[in-house]
């Protein structure tokens, strides 16, 4: 009887693990498939991870947000640990989306048809009293992995002409990188699964 219980327990545990991984993958794929597309300018930082291969660390045009864009500054004039932030984006004349406003917590009104909200987190300790200061939200879109041997060539190209990332944004502001763009040309597209 103990052997059967052990086998049943192992099967149940395996099914739970497979179900959890499937749920994560399906959620990411749903954002990539159905999310609102946004294009951001990027600049290279470092193209290699010894364990995962070539990547581009992305410093984009929403990596630093001016404090003056934050509509609801907290009383203490410092961000707390892991403060949620929503940044409102609007498409510019050059095709790249730019930040127009930001809120700690949630946006008070939904984004308009020509706008999009991206959700992130701000680590603790950012001073907010100087309106000329900036903060660095983490949106979870700071790396794009590339095929082996492609990172250095793309990093060099990024220094001489504009590159961007196409994002897919879920209705709650969660972002997934959909593609790496070289001007209007798609270099690498992220697969759904």
Image (cartoon, grey):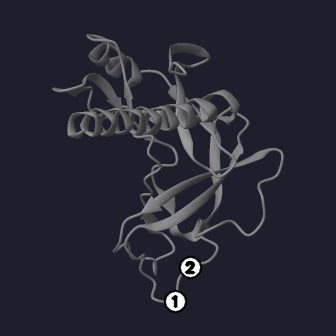
Q: In the displayed orientation, state which residue is furthest to the right.
A: 113
Callout 2 environment at 10 Å: few (<14), some (14 to 19), or many (20+)?
some
**Quadrant location, the N terminus:** top left
Which residue is tagged 1? 75
Label ID, residue 8: none
Question: For residue 185, what is the image quadrant?
Answer: top right
**Residue 140 percent coordinates (x, y):** 44, 45
Left-right relation of 120 to 8: right
Q: Secondary structure at mark 2?
A: loop
Residue at x 48% of width, y 32% of height: 22
Q: Position of residue 172 (x, y in %)?
A: 65, 52
Q: How many marks?
A: 2
Q: Residue 158: which quarter of the image? A: top left
Residue 52, relative to residue 127: is it above or below?
above
Residue 150 vertical placement versus 23 (above, below): above
Left or right side of 126 for 171 = right
- For the point 77% across and 54% down, the residue is 111
In the figure, is residue 84 to the left or right of 35? left
Crowding at dot 1, Cα within 10 Å, few <14 / some 14-19 / many 20+, comes out as: few
Q: Which residue is mark 2?
A: 73
Distance CA(mark 1)–CA(mark 2): 7 Å
């Amino acid at each position: 009887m103990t052997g059967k219980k052990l086998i049943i327990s192992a099967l149940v545990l395996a099914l739970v693990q497979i179900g959890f991984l499937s749920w994560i993958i399906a959620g990411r794929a749903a954002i990539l498939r159905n999310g609102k597309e946004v294009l951001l300018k990027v600049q290279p930082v470092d193209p290699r991870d010894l364990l995962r291969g070539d990547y581009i660390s992305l410093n984009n045009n929403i990596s630093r947000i001016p404090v003056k864009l934050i509509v609801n500054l907290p009383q203490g004039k410092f961000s707390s640990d892991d403060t949620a932030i929503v940044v409102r984006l609007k498409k510019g004349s050059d095709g790249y989306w730019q930040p127009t406003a930001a809120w700690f917590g949630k946006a008070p009104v939904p984004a308009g048809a020509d706008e999009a909200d991206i959700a992130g987190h701000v680590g603790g300790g950012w001073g907010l009293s100087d309106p000329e200061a900036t903060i660095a939200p983490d949106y979870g879109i700071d790396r794009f992995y590339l095929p082996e041997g492609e990172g250095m060539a793309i990093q060099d190209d990024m220094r001489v002409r504009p590159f961007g990332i196409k994002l897919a944004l879920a209705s709650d502001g969660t972002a997934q990188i959909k593609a790496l763009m070289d001007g209007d040309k798609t270099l690498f597209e992220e697969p759904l699964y």
